[in-house]
Image (spheres, grey):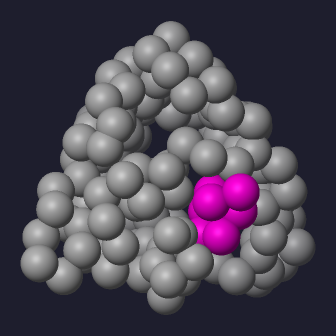
């Protein structure tokens, strides 16, 4: 098992960036690895609450979905959730996100752990693509 760590600075306050991870209308702005649309985002934003997000890839038109449960819900500082793809069996991985106010906005550190070694590069590419969109659409978060 391995993990992927992404650190980005988003030009928006921590409250707005945290909301981008847990509010369906904000998730629709950036979730997914490319410019494909978010098709649905169902979020029960609380410890023990579940989420399910489905999106279409612009690259090939295929659809993917992920789901999990919130293990830590501490706005606007930290969010931890289990993670599973809709179409893959196996143990859940874990996504741990921290949000820290900095002069330029919010430093976001995402650690996606408990990943199968063979799939970690795909997760790194996917999260980086999503964060590229989040950075470019930061002005729409507030």
Where is residue 71, by image quadrant? top left
Q: Quadrant of the N terminus?
A: top left
Considering depth in this image, is 113 or 55 the residue closer to the camera?
55
- Which residue is drawn at the image coordinates 77% and 75% (left, top)? 36
Q: Is residue 124 left or right of residue 54?
A: left
Name, please, the residue furthest toward the front: 142
- Which residue is drawn at the image coordinates 66% and 40% (left, top)? 66
Above/below status of 112 relative to 122: above
Note whether residue 67 is visible: yes
Q: Is residue 58 left or right of residue 32?
A: right
Residue 100: x and y in percent read 16, 56
- The segment highlighted magenta reads 25-33
Residue 87: x and y in percent read 75, 37
- Which residue is drawn at the image coordinates 83% and 49% (left, top)? 40
Q: Is residue 32 magenta?
A: yes
Where is residue 114, by image quadrant? top left
Residue 115: x and y in percent read 37, 40
Main SS, magenta residues: helix
Q: Is residue 111 left or right of residue 135?
A: left
């Amino acid at each position: 098992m391995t993990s992927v760590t992404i650190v980005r600075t988003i030009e928006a306050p921590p409250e707005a960036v945290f909301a981008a991870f847990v509010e369906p209308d904000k998730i629709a702005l950036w979730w997914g690895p490319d410019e494909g649309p978010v098709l649905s985002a169902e979020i029960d934003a609380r410890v023990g609450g579940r989420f399910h997000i489905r999106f279409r890839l612009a690259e090939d038109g295929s659809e993917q979905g992920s789901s999990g449960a919130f293990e830590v819900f501490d706005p606007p500082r930290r969010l931890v959730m289990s993670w599973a793809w809709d179409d893959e069996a196996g143990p859940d991985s874990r996504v741990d996100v921290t949000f820290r106010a900095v002069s330029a906005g919010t430093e976001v550190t995402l650690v996606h752990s408990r990943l199968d070694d063979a799939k970690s590069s795909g997760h790194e590419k996917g999260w980086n693509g999503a964060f590229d969109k989040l950075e470019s659409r930061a002005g729409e978060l507030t």
